[in-house]
C-alpha cells in the first residue's frame, strides 16, 4: 500500500521544522552564552580601566601600625625582616580566617540586586575559594599579598606595605563582586569592600609579624648563648689543664687529667684559680702514695 504523498510531504516538513527549531534553540543558547561572556569581559575591562580611587590614606595605615605595635619592644620587632616561609604562612592564615566572612558579606550585598538567584550565589561560592585545580579569588588574594609582603624581608613591616596589600586586595574583591552582580557597583559598596580588606589585614598582620619576629629573635638568642657557654667552658677547662701541667699531673699521651689529677682539679675554684693550701695537702697525699 502506497503512502499518501500529501502525508509524506507533511511529515517531511514537520521534521525540517523540528530540526530547524533545534538548531535555532542551540544558536540562541550559544548567543546568550557569548553575550554573557562579552558582558563580563566588558565589565572586567571597565573595572581595569576605571580603577576606583583607593580611599584609605597612608596615615590610616600608620595609625594602625602604631595601635597594634604600641610598645618599644613591638616597634623593634615590627622592623625585623622575616623569612619567606614565615611571611607566606602569615598571609595564608589571614586570608583563610577572613575569606568566609568576605563571602557572606558579598552574598548579603548581592541580595539587593534583582535577578541574583540562589544558584548564582552558589556558583559564585564555588569559584571563590582556592582549590587544588584553581586559585580563584582567594588564591589571587593570597598570591598578591605574599608578593607585596616580600618587601618586609629587609625593611620589616611598614605602613606602605600594609597600604599596598590592602589596595590590591580591595581591587581583587571589588572585581569579584562586580562579576557576581553583573553590573557596576556603587561607590558605597566599593568602600565597604575596602573596609573588609582593611579590617582583615591590619591588626592581624601587625600582631602576627611581631609574634613571629619575637620567636625568631628568641631562637637566635638561644643559638648565640650556647656557643658562648661552650667557649666559656672550654676556656675554663683550658685553664685547669694549664694549672695541672704546673704540677706534672696531665697525661701527656691523651692531653687530659690523670685520675689523681682529677681529684686535684675538683678542688679548684670555678674561675680556674687554685686554693694553694688544699693543693699542697692533695700533693702530699699523692706523693706519699707513690713512695709506698
Image: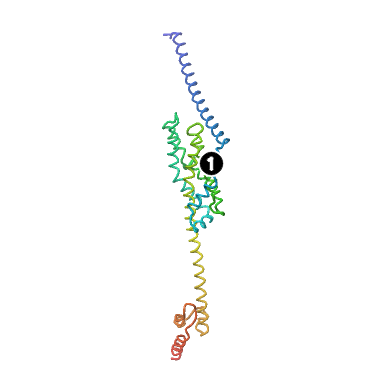
Residue highlighted by disc 1:
55
In front: 282, or 68? Answer: 68
Q: Image quadrant for the C terminus?
A: bottom left
Q: State whether residue 197 is above or below residue 44.
A: below
Q: State whether residue 137 is above or below residue 37.
A: below
Identify which residue is drawn at 52% across, 78% down: 239
Extreme residue toward the right, this view: 49
Identify which residue is drawn at 56% across, 33% down: 46
Extreme residue toward the bottom, this view: 292
Tell me if mark 1 has few (under 14), some (14-19) or many (20+) residues whose alpha carbon lies within 10 angstroms of its own.
few
Q: Position of residue 165 (x, y in %)?
A: 53, 46
Q: Position of residue 256 (x, y in %)?
A: 50, 78
Q: Position of residue 215 (x, y in %)?
A: 47, 58
Q: Position of residue 191 (x, y in %)?
A: 50, 39
Identify which residue is drawn at 49% across, 83% down: 249
Coloring basis for residues: rainbow
Q: Image quadrant for the N terminus?
A: top left
Q: Secondary structure at mark 1?
A: loop
In front: 288, or 138? Answer: 138
In front: 53, or 291? Answer: 53
Amino acid at each position: 500500500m502506497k503512502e499518501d504523498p500529501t502525508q509524506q510531504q507533511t511529515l517531511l516538513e514537520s521534521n525540517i521544522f523540528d530540526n530547524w527549531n533545534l538548531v535555532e534553540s542551540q544558536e540562541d543558547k550559544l548567543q546568550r552564552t557569548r553575550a554573557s561572556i562579552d558582558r563580563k569581559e566588558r565589565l572586567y575591562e571597565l573595572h581595569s580601566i576605571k580603577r576606583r580611587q583607593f580611599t584609605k590614606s597612608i596615615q590610616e595605615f600608620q595609625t594602625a601600625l602604631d595601635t597594634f605595635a604600641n610598645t618599644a619592644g613591638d616597634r623593634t620587632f615590627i622592623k625585623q625582616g622575616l623569612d619567606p616561609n614565615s611571611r607566606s604562612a602569615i598571609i595564608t592564615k589571614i586570608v583563610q580566617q577572613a575569606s568566609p566572612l568576605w563571602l557572606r558579606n558579598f552574598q548579603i550585598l548581592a541580595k539587593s540586586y534583582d535577578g541574583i538567584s540562589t544558584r548564582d550565589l552558589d556558583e559564585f561560592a564555588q569559584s571563590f575559594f582556592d582549590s587544588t585545580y584553581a586559585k580563584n579569588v582567594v588564591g589571587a588574594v593570597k598570591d598578591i599579598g605574599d608578593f607585596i609582603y616580600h618587601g618586609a624581608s629587609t625593611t620589616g613591616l611598614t605602613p606602605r606595605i600594609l597600604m599596598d596589600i590592602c589596595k590590591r586586595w580591595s581591587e581583587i574583591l571589588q572585581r569579584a563582586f562586580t562579576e557576581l552582580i553583573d553590573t557596576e557597583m556603587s561607590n558605597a559598596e566599593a568602600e565597604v569592600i575596602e573596609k573588609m580588606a582593611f579590617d582583615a589585614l591590619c591588626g592581624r598582620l601587625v600582631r602576627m609579624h611581631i609574634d613571629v619576629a619575637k620567636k625568631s629573635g628568641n631562637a637566635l638568642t638561644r643559638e648565640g648563648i650556647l656557643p658562648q657557654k661552650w667557649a666559656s667552658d672550654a676556656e675554663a677547662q683550658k685553664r685547669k689543664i694549664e694549672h695541672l701541667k704546673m704540677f706534672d699531673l696531665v697525661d701527656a699521651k691523651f692531653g687530659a687529667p690523670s685520675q689523681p689529677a682529677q681529684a686535684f682539679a675538683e678542688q679548684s675554684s670555678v674561675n680556674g684559680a687554685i686554693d694553694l693550701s688544699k693543693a699542697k695537702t692533695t700533693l702530699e697525699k699523692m706523693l706519699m702514695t707513690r713512695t709506698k
